Amino acid sequence: MVLGLVELALSTKRCSDWEYNKRVGTRSCWDRPGAGTGETELNRLFYRLGWTKGWYKGELRDKVFGELSSPTARPDWKAIKAKLLELARKYDASTPLTV
């Protein structure tokens, strides 16, 4: 994940905001019903690193950041994402929800 963030930073032409402050009443592709802050931000990270495909357009549309192996020997992304999601939900359960 860290390698993906570094690779993304080296490949990006403009700076992204660290925090996502959406307008009240709007939804984004990474919002999930009942999701806490940890799960929402993790989902946002998955989209940004290309681990989940979404609306992203441009030359890096099909890029998966942080992938070390060849396309024929890819890691088990589903297992990796499932474990990270489990940890995000555990984090959300231990912190009060913010709106």
Image (cartoon, rainbow, N blue to C red):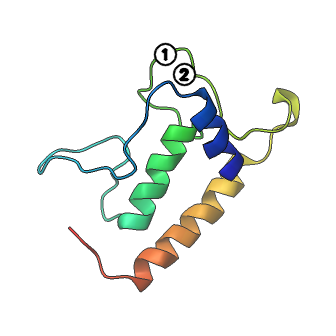
In whole angstroms, how far apart are the C-alphas of marks 2 and 1? 5 Å
Residues 85 and 50: in front is: 50
* Residue 4, numbered circle: none
Viewed as shown, does residue 91 lie left or right of 2? left
How packed is label 1: few (under 14 Cα within 10 Å), some, or many (20 or more)?
Answer: few
Residue 53 lies, in percent from the top left, at 52, 32
Q: Which residue is mark 1?
A: 58
Identify the residue at horizontal 60%, vertical 23% (top origin).
62
Residues tagged 2 and 1 counted as in contact (Cβ below 8 A): yes
Identify the residue at horizontal 35%, vertical 67% (top origin).
36
Camera sees residue 1: no
Residue type highlighted by circle 2: Arg
Per the image, label 1 sits on a secondary structure element best described as loop
Q: Which residue in the rendered view is the most extreme toward the top?
A: 59
Q: Which residue is mark 2?
A: 61
Residue type highlighted by circle 1: Gly
Residue 35 lies, in percent from the top left, at 36, 63
The quarter holding residue 5 reads top right
Residue 73 lies, in percent from the top left, at 88, 36
How packed is label 2: few (under 14 Cα within 10 Å), some, or many (20 or more)?
Answer: few
Identify the residue at horizontal 36%, vertical 65% (top origin).
37
Viewed as shown, does residue 14 lie left or right of 60? left
